[in-house]
Image (cartoon, rainbow, N blue to C red):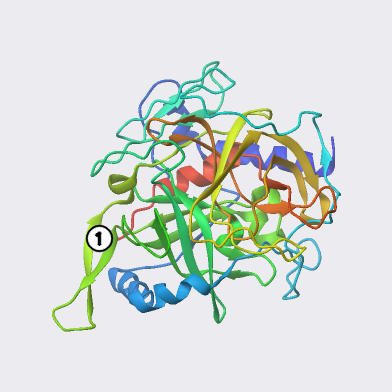
Amino acid sequence: MSSRVRRLTATLGALVAACVTMTSAFAGSAVAGPLNTVPSGITSIPLTKSVADMRRIAEYWSPARLKQAVDNVPATPGVPSAPGGKSGTTTSPSPSTGSATTGSATAAAAGGTGGATSSTGETTTATSGGRIAAKPGGAAPLVRPTLPKKRAPGSGGSPLTVGKVFFRIGNKDYWCSASSVAAANRNLVATAGHCAYDAKTGSQAEYWIFIPGYDKGDTPYGIYVGHSLNLHEDFVGKGDYDYDYAFVTVHDGFRWKAGKTSGRYEMEGVGSLEDNVGGQGLATNRGTGLFTLAFGYPAAPHPDGSRPYDGQRLKSCDGRTIKVQAPARLVEQGIALACGFTNGASGGPWLISYDNRTALGYLNGVNSFAWDTDTDRRYDRISSPYFIASTYVAYHWAATQQAPRT
């Protein structure tokens, strides 16, 4: 066993011990208990402390700025100049081409979404309450997806939960992809860690918002301001892309409506995120070879300069996952999917047991970074961190956070 694996095992043991309040819920109670302090191994960063903070961020993202944001640069995953270090130097948006090592000979294969049953034989059942259920065999818990309350759910390849996040790091605005996740607070978003924290410079995102259902600038289900950012400490401290995920608690949403004076706009509340779009479930420790759908808003060009995407509409890939490693990003437990996504798709959800009838499934990864495995200067693979126990701990802590309400 490598020293890093031993360290990870010890860390996970501490994390599970810190979450003893939730383990009693796995065997049959509906909802895991609350946590009173930030669990070991998790970094929790406040993005707002008051309703006034929320309004200040909302006003920053005025209708005019959101219109201009169409041309913003998508965030790209970067790493410190040395493991554990921090540097502002620019890094490549992908690992060295052709450097992937696979732990399985199984190629990512195309296939239909085929209804509600995955290759593991589990069935996706959407609920109205973000309930936790034990996986068959008593292993890691499943968080069930939830249906929206204010409208019919999505269908086919159009999940209402997926959208764009916009944020600011330093003096520049960026964007990524993300998804609503079922949670006790009904206001939780999952995205990539680098879509909320810059590992190159050690800088957190500011002015962070989520727009589900984003389509060519439209905000059909509201705008949700980030309240707290929750990540694994090894992504924050080391730029370790085995932990390139973030769970962001958000405020109740709003939309801009025309004001009484020409050219002026007013905020109109729309309620919680889950009430409006529902939430994807969450599954950890599921292995590889699972049929998976990845969603996002790719936009950047391929290394050869071709640009098949514009970032204005939701796109998807599907296939079966394989194991990968990327030592330059400290990835020892990555999973990957054959896909031509480019930058902009970062943070978009990987869903298993996807139900075409509701466009809901179980979050089992997020788009992390792109690969060019055949060195033809076009990305052909997208990877994700492998969701393990510590992923659930970060999720569960974030799900207990409540943003102040007006």
| Spot occupied by residue 1 in the image (x, y as percentages of width and height) | 84, 34
x, y percent for residue 122: 51, 20
In the image, residue 151 sits, relative to residue 210, either above or below, namely above
Image quadrant assignment for residue 356: top left
What quarter of the picture does the C terminus occupy?
bottom left
Q: Is residue 18 left or right of residue 265?
A: right
At 52% from the left and 73% from the top, the residue drawn is 71
Q: Provide residue 320's location: percent of width, then percent of height.
A: 66, 32
Q: Position of residue 216 (x, y in %)?
A: 43, 62
Helix, strand or loop at disc 1? loop
Q: Is residue 299 visible?
A: yes
x 17%, y 77%: residue = 259
- Residue at 36 percent across and 40 percent down: it is 154
Q: Is residue 331 left or right of residue 169?
A: right
Between 324 and 53, which is closer to the camera in this rendering? 324
Is 397 placed above or below 227 here?
above
Q: Is residue 37 visible?
A: no
